[in-house]
Amino acid sequence: MSVVFDILASAGLWAAILRIATPLIFGTLGALLCERAGVLNLGIEGIMTFGAMIGWLAVFHGADLWTGVLVAAISGALFGVLHSLLTVTLGLSQHVSGLGVTLFASSFSYYVFRLVVPVAGTPPTVMPFQPIDIPALSSLPFIGPAFFTQTAPTYLAIVVALIMAYIIFRTPVGLAIRMTGENPHAAEAQGVNPMKVRYGAVIVGSALMAVGGAFLTLSAFNSFFPTMVQGRGWICIALVVFASWRPGRALFGALLFAFFDAFQLRLQTVVEGVPYQIFLMTPYILSIFALALMARRARVPQALMQPYRRGER
Amino acid sequence: MRLERREHRPLLLLIGAPIAAIVAALALSGILIAIAGAPVFDAYRRILIGAFGSRLSATETLTRATPLILTGLAAAVAFRARLWNIGAEGQFYLGAIAVAAFGSKLLADLPGPILIPLLLVIGAIAGMALILVPLWLRLRFSVDEVVTSLLMNFIAVLFVSMLIDGVLKDPLAFGWPQSQPVADHATLPKLIARSRLHIGLAIAIVLAVVVYLVQSRTVFGLQSRAAGLNPQGALFMGVPLGRTLVKVACLSGGLAGLAGAIEVMGIKGYVTTDLSPGYGYAGIVVAMLANLNPIGVVLAALFTAIMFVGADGMSRSLGIPTYIADVTVALALLTMLVALFFTQFRIRR
């Protein structure tokens, strides 16, 4: 028990939670936005990988860090255009298109990366985002190191979650998005163009996913390596269900998930005799539990995964 | 401009669409090869030579196609019933580790002619067991099986990693995490002497034909198709939906598990965590390229194997990253989706 208490009492744990949660917050919000408009975006895993690669590559070639993030966002938006073309314009299976986008985006990332950085002993690094020193707050005992030693993108993630909650529930744009996700025919009757709304949501959502990926290479680590996204995209898809498609709960879900992840990482170092693989499995097992727990209760957007074709039912 | 459903589909279009898709995918990757500064046609020529240029490379391509046929079939049977089994990678590993567990010690005293079929069945059962978890979650809690079966892949590989670092670890492997080898008499006979090509290829092709016959000639085949096309309608027609999905899942997971078992018994003899260079995921592409047709799966697996084996050789001589094979195959999936769409729809002004 005292082991558990020691872990909970360390500021490092709480700082790690916010750090681990950041890419998940971006990814979950991105997937959530797509799904609110009725499009499942399984391209997320590949889009995060590409965002991680291209953001890093831009900075490696001399761009400043925020330009790197912007480049990642633009690349994500382009993959969003691809996914929209397939699922919105053509109305193809969202499952298959999304998996196709993931396979393409991740293999394309590895291709570009290997082209620019031939096999080397240690991967080249960039200077990542540094923790921001917030006057007064950062120097508080415990609270400071626990909550106010993050890099800028982490704070941005939290702000984006709040903005998205506001847009979805409090603005006409949000209403149009929700209507399109629930009943595109009714939305069209109200003068909303469901195609445009879906395009917009998927493009912006995919850009957010890519920013989540870029956080990995520009803040959490300082280099890119294949398979570094490690299923985070799929975990985000699970978190969207856990969050019942609500941005506030998505933020909470990502933090809760990160808490368990940060906790198991520290537990690994103190508990002996348990194979480390058991600890590494926990995030995936937790995601499956979260899905089983929430799937029935969650309010799924009614038109999720249904292609919209004008004049067809 | 709008899209309109075609009333009939000309045969030429049905044959031409997949060919056009492959050509488009090759053209798009050609651009990437050109950007990398290599001659495009020369690169593709080298890919073909790399895949078929010698006896060694041709048998290697067929060896590589074997697991792809099986994982492709696994995806094809599942997708046909709209069971989104994306977990073939995990099922592959579980089939492999089950064979290593039973074939290295527990059953190693059995004579070869009994042991080999028994191990193949055990591998298939291990694959089935893994897919039943996401299926159960779908039927019991209505959880979308895409994400759960994907997440199970990570769990399965970690589980395998734990076993080959623990109880199944080979003490003679210089501390390297790999499983104990299966008994010598449990290895699959070779199809062609002095090559890696083993009888697994024949098994895979026979199974493709069997799956084709089951899907087109049996009640179960009809029921699984009905369950995919229109679940409500199928239920109304008296199709036992849950039971059909369980059968489909067992078939799909079994094929993927068998792929892992065959890979261990045919080539490596032991399990490591890099046994599969993504055969499970590539199986999804293979199935889609074949438009879920079991016979088409064999051809699509061959195309994929050509790209992968050929790209190895091309990469060495031209300095293009081998990932170009993955890119081409993924692009082929996307272009095939579009091509198949235009066999069903046309553009009207």
Image (tube, coloured by chain):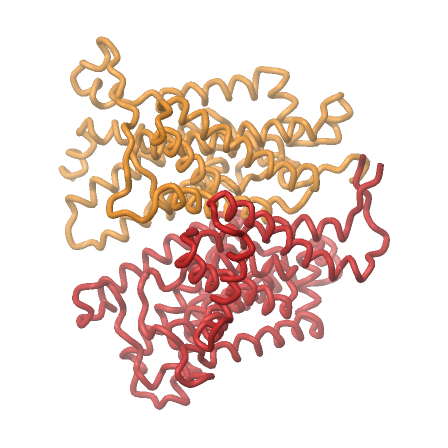
Chain colours: A orange, B red
**Quarter of the figure that contains the N terminus of chain B:** top right
Of A4 and A113, which appears nearest the observer?
A113
A238 is higher (above) or lower (below) than B157? above
Total labels: the figure holds 0
Q: Position of residue B40 (x, y in %)?
A: 54, 52
**Percent x, y of residue B232:** 71, 53
- Closer to us: B233 or B270: B270
In the displayed structure, B207 sits above or below B243; it is below
Q: Residue at x 28, y 52 (%)?
A: A278
Q: Residue at x 45, y 59 (%)?
A: B314
- Against A81, is B126 above or below? below
Q: Position of residue B171 (x, y in %)?
A: 18, 70
Residue at point 26%, 21% (across, down): A131
**Image height of A64 relative to B312, above or below:** above
In the picture, residue B240 is in which quadrant? bottom right
> Which quadrant of the structure image shows residue B174?
bottom left
Q: Is residue A90 left or right of residue B263?
A: right
Q: Which quarter of the rendered picture does the C terminus of chain B lie within?
A: top right
User: Looking at the image, can residue B156 be seen?
Assistant: yes
The reply, left or right, for residue B255 in relation to residue B21 is left
Point out the residue furthest to the top here: A136
Q: Is residue B328 left or right of residue A23?
A: right
Q: Determine if residue B142 is in view.
A: no
- The x, y position of residue A193, in whole percent, is 72, 25
